[in-house]
Image (spheres, grey):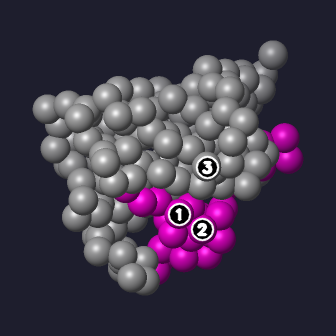
């Protein structure tokens, strides 16, 4: 088995291991940290997954290396820790243990009508580019979008590209709709 196929199998294995069954289009996070539950719409045909120790959800695109997430920082973690943990998660999913990654970043404008700040991160290896958008809302929620695309033709047609956000944080309709659907459920 060649290296490209092994990489694809590893990525698929990681993605499938994160999946959990969920039949409804609207999801509600489990309130494990004494915080108000987060409500969000499941984007399109994305698969839901567990989001490690966070009260939140992770959704993965079934046809491309991309996904969205929403959640609170883990207990005893601040938002910057949540961001660093998410960068490591995305790197593990797509970059197969690459070491010494250098992430570049730029500010993103807030979504219309939402009190938030955003950062667009990107990194790469010799064969792949990865992008992560992370938004922090004033109510303590972090959410975002991530994707991977081939840097060269070596990954071939069996590994489709994820869609990247543009520098203003737009260009991916499913993420825009997901961002609009996120809200806190009052107690």
Mark earlier in primary sequence (2, 3): 3
Q: Residue at x 56, y 44 (%)?
A: 27
Q: Residue at x 52, y 53 (%)?
A: 40
Mark nearer the viewer, 2 or 1? 1
Residue, disc 3:
26
Q: Residue at x 28, y 70 (%)?
A: 117
In the picture, measured across the screen, residue 118 lies left or right of residue 180, that is left
Residue 124 in sight from this viewpoint: no
Residue contact between numbered discs 2 and 3, judged by CB atoms under 8 Å = no
Which of the image's four quarters has the N terminus? top right
Q: Nearer the viewer, residue 105 or 15?
A: 15
Q: Is 178 colored magenta in this rendering?
A: yes
For the stretch drawn in magenta, what is the main secondary structure? loop
Q: Residue furthest bottom?
A: 112
Q: Position of residue 161 (x, y in %)?
A: 71, 54
Residue, disc 2:
177
Q: Nearer the viewer, residue 99 or 27?
A: 27
Mark earlier in primary sequence (1, 3): 3
Real-space Cα separation, disc 2 to disc 3, in angstroms: 13 Å
In the picture, measured across the screen, residue 46 lies left or right of residue 115, that is right
Residue, disc 1:
181
Badge 3 local density, few (<14 within 10 Å), some, or many (20+)? few
- What is the span of residues highlighted in magenta in the rendered image? 156-184
Q: Position of residue 163 (x, y in %)?
A: 66, 62
């Amino acid at each position: 088995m060649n290296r490209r196929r092994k990489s694809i199998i590893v990525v698929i294995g990681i993605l499938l291991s994160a999946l959990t069954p969920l039949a409804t289009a609207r999801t509600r996070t489990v309130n494990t940290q004494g915080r108000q539950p987060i409500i969000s719409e499941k984007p399109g045909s994305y698969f839901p997954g567990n989001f490690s120790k966070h009260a939140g959800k992770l959704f993965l695109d079934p046809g491309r290396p991309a996904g969205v997430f929403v959640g609170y920082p883990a207990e005893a973690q601040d938002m910057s820790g949540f961001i660093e943990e998410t960068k490591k998660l995305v790197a593990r999913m797509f970059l197969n243990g690459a070491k010494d990654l250098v992430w570049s970043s730029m500010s993103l404008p807030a979504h219309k009508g939402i009190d938030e700040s955003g950062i667009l991160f990107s990194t790469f290896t010799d064969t792949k580019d990865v992008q992560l958008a992370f938004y922090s809302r004033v109510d303590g929620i972090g959410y975002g979008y991530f994707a991977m695309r081939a840097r060269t033709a070596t990954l071939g047609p069996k590994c489709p590209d994820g869609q990247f956000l543009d520098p203003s944080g737009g260009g991916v309709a499913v993420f825009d709709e997901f961002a609009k659907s996120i809200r806190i459920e009052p107690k």
